[in-house]
Image: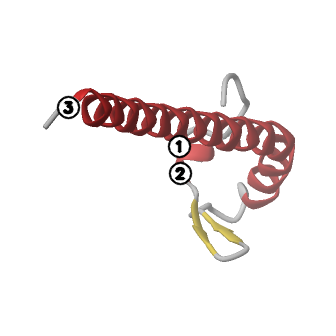
Amino acid sequence: MGNYTSIWGKGPEAFRFQGNRAIVSASEHEVQQVIDYFKAWLPRATSVYKDNLEQQAKRQEHQQRQKLQQEREAEERRLRVLNNIKL
């Protein structure tokens, strides 16, 4: 996620997620500051997550295209062989 400000031990990596809840342990005097930092991280975390999803989709699309290309080339080779066979 890059640079961010947090309370020691309460950075983004310390959070667990259950549905729409973010969970982290914090003492009474840390709670508001943890919430404020969390809210500050959200736009960047959302952007990073979106970028990761887009990159993953591009990789999958590229792999699928490669697979289809290989299958097409194999079928073309097979057809050439069949066309060149003389019985």
Instruction: Give the amino acid type for the residue marked by disc 3 in the picture.
Output: Ile
Who comes first in sequence, dot 2 or dot 1? Answer: 1
Q: Nearer the viewer, mark 2 or mark 1?
A: 2
Q: Looking at the picture, tell me which residue is in the foreground, 80 or 8.
A: 80
Who comes first in sequence, dot 3 or dot 2? Answer: 2
Q: Which of marks 3 and 2 is in front?
A: 3
Mark 3 surroundings within 10 Å by alpha-carbon count, few (fewer than 14), some (14 through 19), many (20 or more): few
* Residue in the image at 66% along x and 31% along y: 1
Secondary element type, mark 1: loop
Who comes first in sequence, dot 3 or dot 1? Answer: 1
Q: Position of residue 46 (x, y in %)?
A: 79, 45
**Looking at the image, is 13 positioned above or below residue 59?**
below
Q: Looking at the picture, tell me which residue is in the foreground, 37 or 63.
A: 63
* In the image: residue 76, left or right of residue 14: left
> Quick check: marks 2 and 1 in contact, CB under 8 Å?
yes
Residue to which mark 2 is pinned: 14
> Quick check: marks 3 and 2 in contact, CB under 8 Å?
no
Mark 1 surroundings within 10 Å by alpha-carbon count, few (fewer than 14), some (14 through 19), many (20 or more): few
Residue to which mark 1 is pinned: 9
Secondary element type, mark 2: helix
* In the image: residue 64, left or right of residue 70: right
**Looking at the image, is 30 positioned above or below residue 9?**
below
Instruction: Give the amino acid type for the residue marked by disc 2 in the picture.
Output: Ala
In the rendering, which numbered label is found on residue 56?
none
In the rendering, which numbered label is found on residue 85?
3
* Residue in the image at 66% along x and 77% along y: 19
Task: Give the Cα separation between the discs numbered 3 and 1.
Answer: 71 Å
Mark 2 surroundings within 10 Å by alpha-carbon count, few (fewer than 14), some (14 through 19), many (20 or more): few
